[in-house]
Image (cartoon, grey):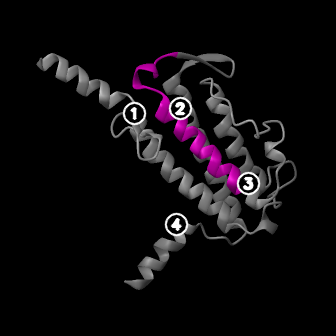
Amino acid sequence: MKFLLLVLVVAISVVPTFSRQTGTLVAPISGFRAEFLRGWDDLEKKVVSLAEATPQEKYGWRPGQGVRSTGEVFAHVAAGNYGYMRWLGIQPASDIDMKTIEQIADKAKIIELLKRSFDHVRQTVIKVPDSDLEKPVKMMNREGTVREAILFVATHQPEHLGQAIAYARMNNIVPPWTAERQAAQEKK
């Protein structure tokens, strides 16, 4: 009986649970996927808030010829979020055109794409059971694992957050989390 109870506890902790109230899967509270999702939520908050803080007229700004514009950087993040999940067999919604996503220049459309793409990754990770993390997947031109594909998106997208921060600073835009910290320090 104790063994059966232990098996049940372990099974519940590694399988996503379903919320009857919301009709959606509930994120894991421990383990690799829970740790990933905590970092993912922070990354999303920073990317989206910086995209929102950047004026539309700066979305076409680029630091040099042949370099992505500000808007292209944000659109590239959204494209990556969708593209990397395809390694896991999860396709973007039918209204997402992967061939033209990085050509979108409208701030509101890009912000909506960012939000949807971050949620796409989140929902994909929630649905992947821990038991599948070591399963093989094709990543670019090589074999990897589900865990490695998730880690790839977790390590690659901050590169573009850093790029967007540099662009913002060059345009005298203070990242919102920095502005919040500075305001809190001034109140002390």
Task: Looking at the image, tell me whether mark 2 or mark 3 is earlier in sequence order.
Answer: 3
Q: Which amino acid, by three-letter code, is at mark 4?
A: Trp
Task: Say whether disc 1 or disc 2 marks the residue closer to the N-terminus.
Answer: 1
Q: Secondary structure at mark 3?
A: helix
Q: Which stretch appears magenta?
A: 111-135
Q: Is residue 121 above or below residue 72?
A: above
How far apart are the two marked residues, 2 and 4, measured between alpha carbons? Answer: 25 Å
Q: Which residue is mark 3?
A: 110
Q: Which mark is residue 150?
A: 2
Q: Nearer the viewer, mark 2 or mark 3?
A: 3
Which quarter of the rendering shows the C terminus?
Answer: bottom left
Q: Residue pushed farthest front? A: 20
Cα separation, mark 1 vs mark 2, equals 10 Å
- Compare marks 3 and 1 and give the one earlier in the sequence: 1
Q: Is residue 88 above or below residue 120?
A: above
* Alpha-carbon span between mark 2 and mark 3: 23 Å
Report the residue marked by disc 4: 177
| Residue 71 relative to residue 149: left or right | right
Q: CB under 8 Å between callouts 2 and 3? A: no
- Report, in whole angstroms, how far the alpha carbon at label 3 lies from the one at label 4: 20 Å
Are the two marked residues, 3 and 4, in contact with CB atoms closer than 8 angstroms?
no
The answer to which image quadrant residue 49 occupies is bottom right
Of tags 3 and 4, the one toward the viewer is: 3
Mark 1 Cα shell of 10 Å, populated few (<14), some (14-19), many (≥20):
some
- Let me know if residue 93 is in the magenta part: no
Q: Which mark is residue 32?
A: 1
Marked residue nearer the N-terminal end (3 or 4)? 3
